[in-house]
Image (spheres, rainbow, N blue to C red):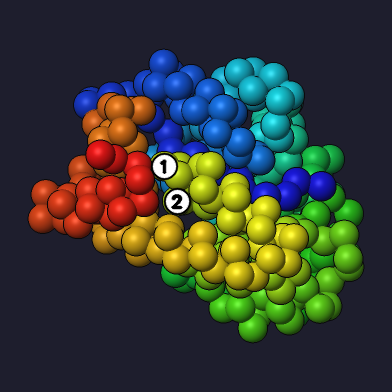
């Protein structure tokens, strides 16, 4: 059972957009030292949409090798092509990932039955724990609670990253799935509320730059300490809000660069964080104690 703060890890790149392996090593060690519960490799924040299959698999492999079993590694292996998702998931298993995170197929707008068949087929094809990922704001595809409940009965499907920010929906899912089916937040601003309602963790963008604080928040919320969880969340709220001034991962990569952890690389069609927003995010980082 993977619980707590799980960072949706950014993928470092140099100024030409090439993968920066040394910076990736630094990021992994940073999270190991700061107490992050698990690393999520090559998800949305990891720019999965702009990495080719070979790069995608190599990033997962290098993270698995560096972590060396110290904490779980969850590999982002979702795709809008079921066959491609199977290829990625098979390779993630091959290189030693502990679990996979599979986003709902984007762009092609499947039906609820299509979603069910897609995830069921992947789970039956590849023997590795799999976590569903529902983020309709990015995919234009919303997996309804009834579909999640159906999929919770499928062997190998062990949980969901529910990133709508709809706490009532999350509560409904938690009430209807088996007790060992893990419901995670994918929305930093409301994550503590989902965990207080029975969720088991947060797959977080904010944790990229504030891993220790996010881990403390998750531990408090999972333990049911509502007062402490809310206090910690209030402290992090400037980050939760301002890390989305432009599309993720644009702001968080800039913030990591400001902290000296990665270079200034990002891949088109994403562009570097606009100068007009930089002072706002810098101030939020100062408020949260990340910068002097």
The residue drawn where x is 73% and y is 81% is: 172
Q: Quadrant of the C terminus?
A: top left
Q: Give the label on residue 209, or none.
A: 1
Q: Residues within 10 Å of mark 1 (few under 14, many from 20)?
A: many
Q: Secondary structure at mark 2?
A: helix
Q: Which residue occupies the foreground of this view, 151 or 285? A: 285
- x and y percentages locating residue 61 in the rendered image: 61, 23
Looking at the image, is 261 positioned above or below residue 183?
A: above
Q: Which residue occupies the foreground of this view, 103 or 72? A: 72
Q: Give the CA distance from mark 2 to mark 1.
A: 6 Å
Q: Quadrant of residue 91?
A: top right
Q: Which residue reaches farthest left?
A: 276
Q: Quadrant of residue 87?
A: top right
Q: Secondary structure at mark 1?
A: loop
Left or right: 77, with 210 as reference point: right
- x and y percentages locating residue 3 in the rendered image: 73, 50
Left or right: 197, with 16 as reference point: right
Reading the image, the residue beneath label 2 is: 206
Left or right: 156, with 82 as reference point: right
Q: Are marks 2 and 1 in contact (CB under 8 Å)?
A: yes
- x and y percentages locating residue 251 in the rendered image: 29, 49
Q: Which residue occupies the foreground of this view, 110 or 95? A: 95
**Residue 152 appears in the rendering:** yes
Left or right: 134, with 120 as reference point: left
The residue drawn where x is 41% and y is 42% is: 209
Looking at the image, is 262 positioned above or below residue 48?
A: above
The residue drawn where x is 82% and y is 47% is: 1
Looking at the image, is 269 positioned above or below residue 20?
A: below
**Residue 112 appears in the rendering:** no
Q: Give the label on residue 118, or none.
A: none
Q: Quadrant of residue 236?
A: bottom left
């Amino acid at each position: 059972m993977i619980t707590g703060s799980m960072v949706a890890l950014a993928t470092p790149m140099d100024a030409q957009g090439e993968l920066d392996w040394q910076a990736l090593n630094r990021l992994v060690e940073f999270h190991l030292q700061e107490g992050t519960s698990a690393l999520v490799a090559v998800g949305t924040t990891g720019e999965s949409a702009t990495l080719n299959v070979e790069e995608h698999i190599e990033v997962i492999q290098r993270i698995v090798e560096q972590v060396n079993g110290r904490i779980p590694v969850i590999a982002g292996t979702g795709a809008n092509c079921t066959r491609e998702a199977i290829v990625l998931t098979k390779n993630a298993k091959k290189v030693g990932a502990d679990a996979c995170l599979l986003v709902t197929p984007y762009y092609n707008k499947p039906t609820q039955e299509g979603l069910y068949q897609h995830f069921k087929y992947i789970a039956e094809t590849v023997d590795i724990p799999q976590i569903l990922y529902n983020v309709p704001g990015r995919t234009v595809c919303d997996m309804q609670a009834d579909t999640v409940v159906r999929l919770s009965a499928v062997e190998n499907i062990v949980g969901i990253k529910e990133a709508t920010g709809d706490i009532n929906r999350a509560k409904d899912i938690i009430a209807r799935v088996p007790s060992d089916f893990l419901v995670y937040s994918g929305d930093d601003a409301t994550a503590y509320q989902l965990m207080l309602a029975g969720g088991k963790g947060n797959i977080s963008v904010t944790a990229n730059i504030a891993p220790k604080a996010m881990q403390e928040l998750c531990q408090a919320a999972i333990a049911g300490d509502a007062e402490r969880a809310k206090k910690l969340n209030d402290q992090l709220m400037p980050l939760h809000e301002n890390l989305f001034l432009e599309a993720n991962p644009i702001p968080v990569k800039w913030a990591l660069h400001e902290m000296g952890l990665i270079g200034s690389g990002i891949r088109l069609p994403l562009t570097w964080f606009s100068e007009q927003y930089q002072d706002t995010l810098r101030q939020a980082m100062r408020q949260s104690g990340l910068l002097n």
